[in-house]
């Protein structure tokens, strides 16, 4: 969109808010909320002679500076505002003491307002800070335009949810292989929020049933910088959609988008899990699986600990080659009493006799260092067998 200029702008204050709505919602299908807020800031700098800074709601409840005007003086406003400001119901002029305490330039007039979709706890997604060296006429210079901005953000929110829902539905209809569909969907969600996304589905016993393992995805949903949303799954399964920020921290808006994606995945999961055919009772177990059964029986009789480390790989044509190479590399690094082999479902296992959970964690970490260096799409988990 071409930059705003003073020429050609509506002269009437009653017309300008309507023009701003059209300006902010134009081409909403291809825009992000930050682009809308930047356009809003440009408009108010010209029409109301105020400088607008926008803050986005972080996951911890605070507000983090997101957009400023080009050339804005970073010393005149704080980079973070406290969570207590999230419950503002109306425009709030800051007193001299408040400006000083929050980190705004003491000589500026500053007015705060919250806009955008509300989170479950009632906090708004965006906080607007309008500042000027001159007194600000709230009713004439701010309020009508903030109403227009609120409307534009609501339109954009609905458009983004519709786009993401449509994109995921198309993926799930077009891609029949569940792991491939999960990986493609995770990549699409990651593109939408600007981060790395992973879908993980495990059985109630902890076995991995489906994992997207997008390249670069977060290793765990417990990552401090990450975000995780539970996906309702069929009985016997637990599903999680997790994300980690790339160029910026994740926000409450990203959580909302992740929840939208989870609602689409919820409808797809039963069909996807039905397509996944694990080993049936009639299928011939692999030699490694027979060895596990025997070891479990012996360890149970002796009351000895027994652990298993499972190595899984991203779905794709090279999955089998990755598994075969990994078995060879793992055999060079484990004890003589340990056993490694492949499951019929494609994963690689390392059986650890007389090994407690603590010892298995050490082996798991050792294997992660060994295999992550050559294959970033590897996933390693530990399971206690008794």
Image (tube, rainbow, N blue to C red):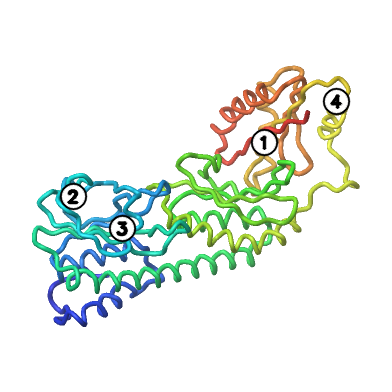
Distance between the Cα atoms at labels 3 and 2?
15 Å
Q: Secondary structure at mark 1?
A: strand
Please tell me which residue is depicted at 39% across the width and 47% down the height of the picture.
Answer: 249
Q: Who comes first in sequence, dot 3 or dot 2? A: 2
- Residue 127: give its label: 3
Viewer-nearest of labels 3 and 1? 3
Residue 130 location in percent, x, y? 20, 60
> What is the C-alpha distance between the residues marked 3 and 4?
60 Å
List the residue tagged with mark 2.
99
Q: For label 2, count other residues whose C-alpha is less than 10 Å away and answer few (under 14), some (14-19) or many (20+).
A: many
Which of label 2 and label 1 is nearer to you?
2
Q: As drawn, is 122 to the left or to the right of 370?
A: left
Image point (27%, 56%), residue name: 67
| Mark 2, secondary structure of its residue | helix
Looking at the image, the residue that sits furthest to the right is 282
Q: Is 301 situated left or right of 352 in this image?
A: right
C-alpha span from label 2 to label 1: 55 Å
Where is residue 29? Give x, y as percent. Answer: 41, 71
Query: For the residue labelled by badge 3, is the local secondary structure a helix, a strand or a loop?
Result: strand
Q: Earlier in the sequence, mark 2 or mark 1?
A: 2
Could you tell me which quadrant the N terminus lies in? Answer: bottom left
The residue to which callout 4 is attached is 300
Q: Nearer the viewer, residue 134 or 274?
A: 134
Q: Which mark is residue 311?
A: 1
Residue 255 is tagged as none
Using the numbered discs, state the Cα–Cα distance from disc 3 to disc 1 in whole angstroms: 45 Å
Which of the 4 image quadrants contains residue 56?
A: bottom left
* Closest to the observer, 331 or 202: 202
């Amino acid at each position: 969109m071409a930059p705003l200029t003073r020429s050609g702008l509506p002269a009437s204050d009653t017309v300008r808010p309507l023009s701003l709505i059209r300006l902010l919602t134009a081409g909403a299908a291809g825009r992000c909320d930050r682009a809308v807020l930047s356009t809003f800031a440009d408009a108010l700098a010209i029409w109301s002679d105020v400088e607008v800074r926008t803050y986005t709601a972080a996951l911890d409840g605070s507000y983090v500076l997101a957009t400023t005007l080009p050339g804005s003086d970073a010393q005149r406003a704080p980079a973070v505002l406290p969570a207590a400001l999230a419950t503002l119901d109306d425009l709030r002029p800051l007193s001299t003491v408040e400006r000083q305490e929050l980190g705004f330039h003491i000589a500026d007039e500053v007015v705060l307002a919250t806009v955008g979709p509300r989170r479950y706890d009632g906090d708004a997604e965006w906080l607007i800070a309008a500042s000027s060296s001159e007194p600000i006429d709230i009713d004439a210079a701010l309020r009508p335009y903030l109403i227009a901005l609120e409307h534009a953000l609501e339109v954009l929110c609905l458009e983004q949810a519709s786009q993401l829902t449509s994109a995921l539905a198309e993926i799930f209809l077009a891609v029949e292989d569940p792991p491939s569909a999960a990986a493609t969907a995770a990549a699409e969600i990651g593109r939408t929020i600007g981060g790395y996304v992973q879908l993980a589905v495990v059985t109630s016993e902890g076995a991995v049933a489906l994992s997207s393992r997008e390249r670069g995805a977060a290793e765990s949903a417990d990552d401090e910088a990450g975000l995780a949303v539970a996906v309702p799954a069929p009985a016997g399964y637990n599903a999680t959609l997790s994300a980690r920020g790339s160029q910026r921290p994740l926000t409450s808006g990203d959580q909302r988008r992740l929840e939208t994606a989870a609602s689409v995945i919820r409808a797809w999961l039963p069909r996807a899990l039905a397509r996944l055919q694990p080993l049936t009772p009639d299928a011939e177990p692999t030699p490694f699986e027979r060895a596990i059964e025997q070891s479990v029986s012996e360890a149970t009789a002796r009351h000895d600990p027994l652990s298993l480390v499972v190595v899984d790989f991203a779905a794709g044509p090279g999955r089998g080659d990755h598994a075969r190479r990994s078995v060879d590399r793992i055999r060079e690094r484990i004890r003589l009493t340990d056993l490694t082999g492949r499951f019929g479902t494609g994963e690689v296992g390392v059986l650890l006799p007389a090994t407690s959970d603590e010892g298995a964690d050490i082996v798991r970490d050792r294997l992660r260092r060994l295999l992550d260096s050559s294959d970033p799409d590897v996933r390693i988990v530990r399971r206690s067998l008794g």
